[in-house]
Amino acid sequence: MARVLVIEDDELARESVTLMLEESGHEVAMADDGDVGLKMFSEEPYDLVVTDLIMPEVNGMDVLSQIKQEHPDTRVIVISGGGRLTPISYLDVAMKLGADDVLTKPFTAFELTSSAAMVLHSPAAPNPFH
């Protein structure tokens, strides 16, 4: 299966997403914020990155943009429960920035693993940075 990096500042959410992906056969690494996640990604590429949007320091939009600029073939799923705006508003922006898929929290294991399977087996999304 795929090598997946989960970037999520909420410990329970991070561990839940990791467990869901591991149970479907993926090899999963975790980062507790965007800065750590980008460092891990630069040291070792992943097939798929699942990142939260709203995080302190380096947020998910920055993670998405940097990964898509440097590694346009890497698949990225963006997850969000919202914030000041509705989750849909943030996720719409993420799609425009090149996310391969988006999920609104809370989501089920089936929704996450189906999304991962879909993006890992689909042609690359158009890269807005090239």
Image: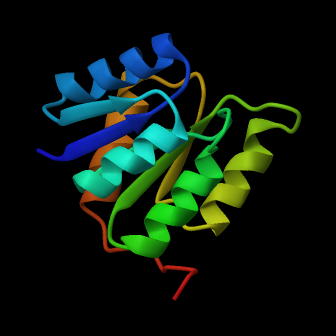
Q: Residue at x 72, y 59 (%)?
A: 93
Q: Is residue 43 above or below residue 7?
A: below
Find the residue positioned furthest to the top: 12
Q: Residue at x 71, y 56 (%)?
A: 92
Q: Residue at x 36, y 28 (%)?
A: 110
Q: Position of residue 15 (x, y in %)?
A: 38, 16
Q: How is the image coloured?
A: rainbow
Q: Is residue 26 above or below residue 10?
A: below
Find the residue positioned furthest to the right: 84
Number of numbered tags placed on the structure image: 0
Q: Position of residue 126 (x, y in %)?
A: 48, 80
Residue 56 or 119: which is nearer the viewer? 56
Q: Residue at x 13, y 32 (%)?
A: 25
Work out whether residue 119 can be spotted.
yes
Q: Position of residue 101 (x, y in %)?
A: 49, 53
Is 51 left, or right, of 91 in this rendering?
A: left
Work out whether residue 47 can be spotted.
no
Residue 84 or 123: which is nearer the viewer? 84
Find the residue positioned furthest to the bottom: 130
Q: Is residue 106 above or below residue 48?
A: above
Q: Position of residue 41 (x, y in %)?
A: 33, 51
Q: Is residue 51 above or below residue 38?
A: above
Please tell me in which quadrant of the rendered image residue 74 appears.
Answer: bottom left
Please tell me in which quadrant of the rendered image residue 129 appears.
Answer: bottom right
Is 90 left, or right, of 58 in this rendering?
A: right
* Quadrant position of the N terminus in the picture: top left
